[in-house]
């Protein structure tokens, strides 16, 4: 069975690009545009990793990340954060993100990062 | 010589105190009016003694005393130094 | 009732008063007065206004003239409930200037003129003498009532003898307690307390008799009212002239009577007591007059025709066999008489000794000022004066034979002291009042009063020959005592009141207007009139060449050795010196004078110090020098103040600028970070999809789809850059406005059409009032339309109502046009309303259609450039924005 990636991103075009790239790489991608829906999805269909945008409407990326880390079920879930602003990086680090990707990114770059996080060599 | 400047507007408490002083100043004027009033309504400018007159004058008197008593506590300790001629 | 028992009661009562006064003096000496200096004692001491004339005479007055007796109380009532006007100032001046009597007040105010002191003293003594005689008479009369009621009808004591004994006894009491010491302030605690006790006795006695009459003789209140109405009305008539005149007269008297001034101002311990007395004293007066009418009515009914109504208070209980009650009434009357005489004689003695005897002594024996112990001289002068005053009273009593009705002489005395009123009022309210004016006014008033009221009261032929009454003075018909200047048919008292007050006031005002006051007068005038301003004014003494030893010697002779030494020691220490001899600085001379004037009066104290200082006192030049010096100091400090204020302002401005810079720097960081985010977001999509496309190997429909995404995101990027540029131009004010007349309706039409591009799928109701929109505005039409488009698009974008509706309301007022855009959505939460006009402050909303959150910021900038504004209108049901533009925008100078 294909590994499952949860993508939390509010920009529909970016979400579509990432979904296209990861699906083509043989992963199953589910998508949520904001925090509450993402957390619901996380419980209903636990993913193998999360790609999380930093700037989200309502709940911010950092808040979602700490919610993920607070839940024992998802405490060790690998999380990659997408940031558009340089100094967001250290904040995300402190909140417990595993990897960072700065927008805009190269397609090969993100696919390689996801692969390594999922341990697919 | 310049006079010390005074504030144009006052907080609530000093404002009330000043209006109380105004009332205290008006009280004797009010009293004079009430005490001379019977002269106006007496026919042919003469006044004779009737129990009604007695009761009227003593009532006016009591009212004046009562008002003065009501004003007095608020006026006491009013050190006029800064608050004259308001 | 045995007459001897009465005499015994009298003696016991007097002994009790002595004890009270003695105990209180003892406590005062130890400084333990406690409740004895309470407002109650102060108020009760004021009751010496109610003399025997009031106690006995009021009933007679009521029996003769009906309600007119009330006027005697209404005057004081008005003065006291109106204490904020006059009494407050009088008491403050009295305390601040150590005033010892009303003569001292006048003399001190008008340049410490002893002439004025003498005139006021003369007026007071002349007016008070018959009044004191009146008190003696009332005591004699009341004794007489008891004597004639004695069963054997014998009169063990001759009235003249009674009068002598009473006068001697009073003199003894007054000298004992009134001249014990020479205080810095002329206060007599023992006497004041004794007076307060007597006040209670008076009130209780009168209330007891009144209650007995109402509930003991008559059948209660209703019955008394019926009796009042049934009484002979025709005999009781009040003339309006007398009614008004006597109210005025009694008001003047309560201020000017020497004894009232003594207890009200001189003996005042605490200004707060006056506040209490302002209602308590009128209440006391009301109590004193409550039963007067019933007693008069019942007395007229019960007593035989021809009985003296002045004595009803005594004769009614006696006739009803109430011996004890009569005794109480007698003691009440006795109290009224004695308390008045005691205080009056102290007040008069202070005036006489300070203004007549001591100055005379100093003039006759200039050497004495440096040698004798003045304290004993002053005290001896007081004792002599007290004796003299009582002797005068007794002499008048003997002379007049005790015949006149009590009330008429009372009013004449009132009118006499009222002559001081214009000068006193002028002195404390009008800085322009001068010594010459005051002298003229007082002498005129005194002369008119004497001629028109006082001398005629002895009867035709007694002092003024008969011919003067009928033909006038020197045969001049317009100089008849009771019809001056041909004013016939006036009531004598009102006639005298009118002419004396008119001529007195006129002489005073004209005299003041046409003379120039001396320097001390001007200083004192300012200090009195502006007593509440705090500052005492420039010093009264130029630095003289007085020897401190000489000053100390003089002070010792007036204040006593110990008091003087401690005064000088304190002053020396304040100057930083050891020992007892301070430098004779102006300030020290000032305080010394104030202290001395508390004992011997302002004029004498001033004269004595001048004698030692050598140079009489300040001159006008000194005054002007002092004034200009203090003006310079004021000017200098004002300049310092201004400089300091400027420094504070500069510091404030700097701090503000710094804060602004810090904030700007923070804003700049946030702005750059925001821009970075806004630019990176479309870039991310563009980069990702363009890479996907370059890899080839895609379904054709996906190629098209991704191509369109790239296109849209590129457009978004462009728009963002456009907006940023636009904003930058607007913010820098470098925008080029194209002004012209344009129809508001046209602009709104254009905006509505343009905004249709936003969410075109939505059905959107627009409510307009077309007639109101027919306004031509001189403005930049393109820019204003841009604002409208933005607001309408926002409404289309964010209005979340099921049937979205936008209302556009136009108003035109005072050269400004307002256009409101109100939708029926949820509106903007309160917390966010302040933020929406900030850059990138997009609200968290799913429906953001590619805007970068710059729209409203741009609108704000545009409106600022157009001389108007755009603001959020809260409380309109939905989101509401108000655009305000000037009707005619003039070309900006920039």
Image (cartoon, rainbow, N blue to C red):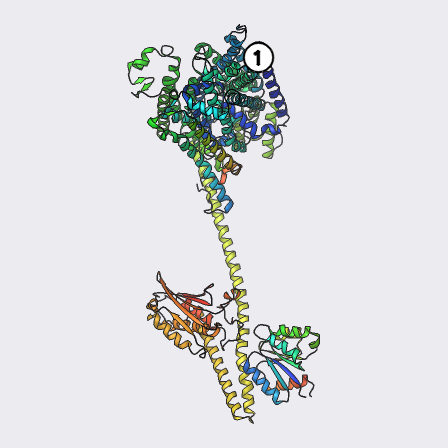
Residue C837 image offset from top left, x and y in percent: 48, 68
Q: How many marks?
A: 1
Q: Decide if residue C204 is on the left or right side of residue C867.
A: right
Q: Decide if residue C831 is on the left or right side of residue C497.
A: right
Q: Residue furthest bottom?
A: C697
Give the position of the N terminus of chain B as an image quadrant.
top left
Residue B57 image offset from top left, x and y in percent: 44, 29
Q: Is residue C629 visible?
A: no
Q: Residues within 10 Å of mark 1 (few under 14, many from 20)?
A: some
Q: Image height check: is C280 above or below A76?
A: above
- Give C642 or C501, whichever is nearer the viewer: C501
- Give C595 or C79, whichever is nearer the viewer: C79
Q: Image height check: is C598 above or below C722?
A: above
Q: Secondary structure at mark 1?
A: helix
- Give C377 or C100, whichever is nearer the viewer: C100
Residue C869 image offset from top left, x and y in percent: 42, 65
Give the position of the C terminus of chain B as an image quadrant.
top left
Which quadrant would residue C150 be assigned to in this image?
top right
- Give C581 or A14, whichever is nearer the viewer: A14
Mark 1 chain: C
Q: Image height check: is C565 above or below C677?
A: above
Q: Image height check: is C838 above or below C33?
A: below
Residue A79 image offset from top left, x and y in percent: 66, 79
Q: Is residue C443 visible?
A: yes
Residue that carries the numbered disc 1 in the rendered image: C6
């Amino acid at each position: 069975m294909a590994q499952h990636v949860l993508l939390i991103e509010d920009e529909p075009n970016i979400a579509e690009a990432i979904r296209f790239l990861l699906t083509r790489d043989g992963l199953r991608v589910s998508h949520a545009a904001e925090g509450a829906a993402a957390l619901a999805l996380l419980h209903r269909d636990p993913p193998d990793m999360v790609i999380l945008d930093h700037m989200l409407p309502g709940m911010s990326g950092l808040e979602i990340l700490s919610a993920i880390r607070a839940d024992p079920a998802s405490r060790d879930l690998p999380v990659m954060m997408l940031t558009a602003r340089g100094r967001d990086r250290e904040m995300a680090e402190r909140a417990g993100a595993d990897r960072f990707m700065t927008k805009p990114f190269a397609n090969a770059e993100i696919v390689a990062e996801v692969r390594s996080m999922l341990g697919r060599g | 010589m310049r006079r010390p400047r005074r504030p144009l507007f006052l907080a609530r408490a000093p404002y009330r105190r000043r209006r109380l002083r105004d009332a205290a100043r008006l009280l004797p004027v009010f009293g004079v009016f009430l005490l001379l009033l019977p002269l106006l309504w007496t026919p042919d400018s003469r006044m004779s003694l009737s129990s009604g007159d007695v009761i009227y004058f003593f009532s006016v008197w009591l009212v004046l005393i009562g008002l003065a008593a009501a004003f007095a506590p608020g006026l006491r300790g009013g050190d006029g130094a800064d608050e004259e001629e308001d | 009732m045995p007459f001897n028992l009465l005499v015994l009661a009298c003696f016991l009562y007097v002994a009790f008063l002595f004890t009270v006064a003695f105990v209180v003096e003892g406590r005062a000496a130890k400084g333990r007065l406690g409740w004895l200096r309470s407002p109650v004692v102060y108020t009760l001491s004021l009751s010496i206004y109610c003399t025997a004339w009031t106690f006995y005479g009021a009933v007679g007055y009521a029996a003769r003239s009906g309600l007119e007796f009330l006027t005697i109380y209404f005057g004081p009532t008005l003065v006291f409930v109106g204490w904020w006007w006059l009494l407050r100032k009088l008491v403050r001046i009295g305390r601040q200037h150590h005033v010892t009597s009303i003569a001292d007040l006048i003399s001190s105010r008008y340049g410490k003129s002893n002439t004025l002191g003498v005139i006021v003293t003369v007026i007071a003594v002349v007016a008070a003498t018959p009044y004191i005689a009146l008190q003696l008479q009332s005591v004699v009369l009341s004794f007489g009532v008891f004597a004639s009621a004695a069963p054997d009808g014998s009169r063990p004591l001759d009235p003249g003898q009674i009068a002598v004994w009473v006068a001697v006894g009073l003199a003894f009491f007054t000298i004992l307690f009134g001249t014990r010491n020479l205080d810095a302030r002329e206060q007599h605690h023992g006497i004041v307390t004794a007076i307060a006790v007597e006040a209670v006795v008076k009130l209780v006695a009168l209330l007891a008799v009144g209650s007995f009459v109402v509930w003991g003789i008559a059948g209660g209140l209703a019955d008394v009212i019926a009796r009042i109405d049934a009484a002979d009305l025709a005999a009781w008539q009040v003339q309006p002239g007398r009614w008004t005149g006597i109210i005025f007269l009694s008001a003047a008297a309560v201020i000017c009577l020497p004894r009232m001034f003594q207890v009200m101002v001189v003996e005042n311990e605490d200004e707060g007591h006056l506040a209490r007395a302002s209602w308590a004293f009128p209440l006391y007066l009301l109590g004193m007059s409550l039963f007067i009418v019933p007693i008069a009515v019942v007395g007229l009914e019960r007593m035989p025709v021809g009985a003296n109504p002045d004595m009803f208070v005594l004769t009614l209980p006696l006739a009803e066999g109430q011996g004890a009650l009569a005794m109480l009434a007698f003691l009440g009357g006795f109290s009224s008489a004695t308390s008045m005489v005691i205080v009056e004689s102290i007040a008069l003695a202070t005036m006489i000794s300070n203004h007549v005897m001591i100055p005379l002594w100093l003039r006759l024996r200039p050497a004495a000022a440096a040698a004798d112990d003045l304290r004993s001289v002053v005290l001896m002068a007081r004792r002599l004066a007290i004796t003299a005053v009582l002797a005068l009273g007794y002499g008048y009593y003997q002379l007049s034979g005790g015949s006149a009705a009590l009330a008429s002489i009372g009013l004449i005395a009132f009118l006499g002291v009222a002559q001081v009123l214009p000068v006193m009022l002028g002195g404390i309210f009008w800085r322009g009042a001068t010594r010459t004016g005051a002298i003229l006014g007082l002498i005129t008033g005194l002369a008119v009063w004497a001629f028109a009221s006082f001398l005629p009261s002895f009867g035709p032929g007694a002092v003024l020959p008969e011919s003067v009454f009928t033909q006038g003075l020197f045969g001049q018909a317009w100089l008849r005592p009771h019809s001056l200047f041909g004013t016939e048919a006036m009531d004598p008292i009102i006639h005298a009141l009118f002419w004396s007050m008119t001529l007195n006031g006129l002489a005073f005002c004209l005299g003041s207007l046409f003379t120039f006051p001396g320097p001390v007068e001007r200083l004192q005038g300012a200090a009195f009139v502006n007593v509440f301003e705090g500052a005492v004014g420039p010093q009264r003494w130029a630095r003289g060449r007085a020897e401190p030893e000489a000053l100390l010697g003089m002070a010792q002779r007036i204040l006593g050795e110990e008091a003087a030494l401690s005064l000088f020691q304190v002053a020396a220490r304040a100057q930083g010196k050891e020992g007892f001899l301070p430098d004779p600085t102006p300030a020290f001379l000032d305080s010394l004078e104030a202290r001395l004037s508390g004992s011997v009066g302002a004029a004498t104290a001033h004269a004595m110090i001048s004698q030692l200082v050598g140079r009489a006192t300040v001159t006008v030049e000194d005054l002007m020098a002092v004034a200009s010096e203090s003006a310079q100091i004021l000017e200098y400090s004002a300049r310092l103040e201004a400089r300091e204020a400027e420094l504070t302002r500069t510091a404030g401005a700097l701090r503000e600028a710094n804060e602004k810079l810090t904030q700007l720097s923070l804003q700049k960081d946030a702005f750059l970070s925001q821009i970075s985010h806004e630019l990176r977001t479309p870039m991310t999509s563009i980069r990702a999809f363009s890479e996907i496309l370059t890899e080839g190997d895609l379904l054709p429909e996906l190629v098209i789809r991704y191509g369109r995404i790239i296109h849209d995101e590129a457009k978004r990027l462009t728009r963002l850059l456009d907006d940023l540029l636009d904003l930058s131009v607007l913010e820098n004010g470098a925008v080029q406005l194209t002004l012209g007349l344009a129809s508001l309706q046209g602009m709104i039409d254009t905006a509505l059409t343009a905004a249709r591009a936003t969410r075109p799928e939505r059905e959107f109701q627009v409510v307009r009032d077309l007639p109101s929109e027919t306004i031509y505005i001189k403005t930049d039409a393109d820019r204003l339309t841009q604002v409208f488009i933005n607001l309408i698009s926002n409404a289309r974008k964010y209005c979340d109502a099921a049937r979205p509706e936008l209302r556009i309301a136009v108003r035109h007022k005072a050269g400004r046009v307002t256009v409101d855009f109100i939708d029926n959505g949820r509106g903007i939460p309160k917390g966010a309303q302040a933020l929406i006009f900030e850059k990138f402050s997009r609200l968290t909303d799913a429906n953001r259609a590619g805007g970068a959150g710059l729209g409203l910021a741009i609108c704000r900038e545009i409106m600022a450039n157009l001389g108007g504004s755009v603001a959020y209108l809260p409380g309109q049901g939905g989101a509401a924005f108000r655009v305000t533009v000037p009707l005619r925008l003039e070309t900006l100078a920039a």
